[in-house]
Image: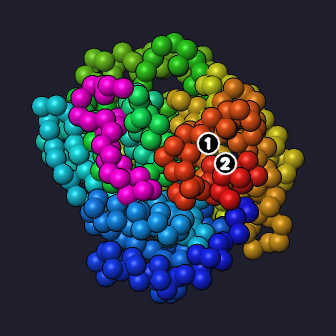
């Protein structure tokens, strides 16, 4: 993944820049020791790394504004960072960039159960948002697999989803307002704790903008009452294509489970070796969860059983207790960690129409054979959000490049099937050079003109999202 050549002018002024940052911020908020900045040289796309010029760790919106204003005045590139869990290289810095991390901004600022919202600082982790309100019977719906560690700021930047997004939607469907700091240091309030803000939908522009337009420091999030009950079923099949067809039929029938998750044999074998969830010996399995009253759950699961039976399942297992429900989900929740037993892997993120699942899964198998690299599929099947995991050996010369070429073919397949390059991981560095597969030149121009408005000097995360040759004139 190419990066722009660092500015020699900025690099030569490192001492002056760090001194100015220390003057504008508390001394412990600025890190410039190379041994310490190394912790910020990459995110979860760890194949690529570069130590930043410096790191700032503010505690308040005012400190964020001071840092951005100073970097703007001095022409210093800035990379926002939530928790660093991005799988697309969204928070990887360049050598001339300042990383602005939000980890210290993790407070709950306001909870309003009457109006169903919580306001938090954007460095707060996803799971801890629910943790702050679950004792009162409430929860925050988006639940990415990294929810224990990932920050709300990153969730907003990448429009993250999760297993339960089929029913409750992704971040943009649960985000009500933000406090945004522009690159010029201006603090702007967008949206708020009400149904719909007047004027332009700037909140919809900010959510999913990957740190290109500003730094979100606070977020107002929609919260929901916990469901009366929930029950998962596990359905095993003899092939990926048949499991995909079952998913398409469930959605086609108008049933709306809270989640439909997919795992294939490589993932099943890895999770069984790792956590012994007790999954059946099959090529693919689905985890389908329904929630509501006992009568609602029974009705939905009855319909799902009928649909599943038409595809001749290897096994249909309905949880009869909380412990059995936990074990059904155990392997799925452990899948990404468990797959590390098989070797290094690259996790992709393409989205397709659910009706295309059987054909796309078949074609991914063919691509795997063509490139000679194993693929494990584990993903949010209900909304077609694919997460193929390509297994390779990072220590073998040429394997990483082969893996990337194979990944590009799978993502192109997603677009050809009527889908898009990303469902929740973002474009970042990983898919930057594939943007021209999905978007025409005039589409990319329209998107870049939006960035021009918010960040005319192109200092914010400017090496991401847009192919470098497309954005070169602006970045120059």
Residue shown at 47%/37% (left/top)?
A: 205
Q: For this view, does 106 lie left or right of residue 475? A: left
Instruction: Name the residue carrying label 1.
Output: 448
Reply above or below: 446 against 302: below
Q: Is residue 255 visible?
A: yes
In front here: 299 or 354? 354
Q: Tell me the residue at 24%/29% (across/down).
A: 194
Which residues are the magenta region?
174-199
Q: Magenta includes 189?
A: yes
Residue designated by label 2: 466
Give the image quarter of residue 391: bottom right
Is residue 323 something one can see in this rendering? no
Q: Where does residue 351 sit, x and y in percent of width and height?
A: 62, 35
Residue at the image point whose x is 79% and y is 50% from the top: 406
Q: Position of residue 88 (x, y in %)?
A: 60, 54
**125 horizontally vs 285: left or right:** left
- Confirm or deny contact between disc 2 and disc 1 (CB under 8 A): yes
Q: Residue at x 39, y 44 (%)?
A: 143
- Number of numbered discs overlaid on the protein picture: 2
In percent of width and height, residue 259 lies at 44, 32
Label 2 vs 1, first from the N-terminus: 1
Q: Position of residue 332 (x, y in %)?
A: 49, 47
Which picture quadrant has residue 6?
A: bottom right
């Amino acid at each position: 993944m190419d990066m722009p050549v660092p500015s020699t002018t900025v690099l030569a002024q490192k001492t002056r820049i760090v001194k100015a940052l220390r003057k504008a911020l508390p001394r412990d908020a600025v890190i410039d020791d190379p041994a310490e900045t190394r912790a910020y040289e990459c995110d979860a796309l760890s194949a690529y790394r570069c130590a930043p010029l410096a790191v700032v760790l503010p505690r308040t919106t005012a400190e964020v504004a001071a840092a951005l204003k100073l970097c703007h005045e001095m022409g210093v590139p800035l990379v926002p960072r939530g928790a660093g869990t991005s799988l697309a290289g969204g928070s990887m810095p360049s050598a001339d960039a300042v990383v602005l991390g939000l980890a210290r901004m993790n407070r709950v600022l306001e909870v309003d159960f009457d109006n169903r919202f919580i306001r938090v600082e954007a460095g707060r982790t996803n799971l801890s948002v629910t943790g702050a309100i679950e004792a009162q019977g409430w929860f925050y719906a988006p639940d990415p697999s990294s929810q224990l560690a990932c920050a709300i700021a990153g969730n907003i930047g990448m429009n993250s989803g999760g297993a339960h997004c089929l029913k409750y939607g992704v971040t943009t469907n649960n985000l009500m307002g933000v406090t945004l700091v522009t690159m010029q240091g201006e603090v702007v309030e967008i949206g708020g704790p009400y149904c719909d803000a007047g004027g332009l939908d700037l909140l919809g522009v900010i959510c999913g903008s990957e740190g290109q337009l500003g730094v979100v420091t606070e977020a107002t999030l929609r919260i929901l009452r916990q469901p009366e009950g929930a029950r998962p079923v596990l359905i095993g099949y003899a092939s990926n294509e048949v499991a995909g067809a079952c998913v398409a039929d469930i959605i086609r029938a108008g049933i709306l489970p809270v989640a439909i998750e997919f795992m294939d044999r490589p993932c099943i074998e890895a999770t069984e070796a790792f956590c012994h969830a007790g999954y059946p010996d099959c090529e693919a399995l689905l985890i389908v969860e329904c929630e509501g009253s006992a009568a609602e759950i029974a009705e939905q699961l009855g319909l799902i059983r009928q649909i599943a039976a038409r595809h001749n399942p290897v096994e249909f297992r309905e949880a009869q207790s909380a412990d059995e429900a936990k074990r059904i989900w155990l392997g799925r929740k452990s899948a990404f960690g468990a797959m590390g037993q098989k070797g290094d892997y690259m996790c992709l993120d393409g989205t397709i129409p659910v009706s295309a699942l059987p054909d796309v899964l078949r074609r991914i198998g063919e691509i795997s054979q063509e490139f000679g690299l194993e693929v494990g599929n584990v993903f949010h099947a209900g909304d077609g959000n694919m997460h193929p995991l390509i297994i390779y050996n990072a220590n073998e010369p040429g394997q990483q490049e082969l893996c990337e070429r194979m990944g590009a073919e799978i993502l192109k397949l997603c677009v050809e099937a009527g889908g898009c390059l990303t469902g929740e991981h973002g474009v970042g560095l990983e898919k930057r050079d594939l943007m021209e597969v999905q978007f025409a030149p005039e589409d990319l121009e329209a998107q870049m003109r939006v960035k021009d408005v918010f960040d005319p000097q192109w200092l914010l995360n400017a090496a991401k999202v847009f192919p470098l040759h497309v954005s070169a004139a602006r970045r120059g």
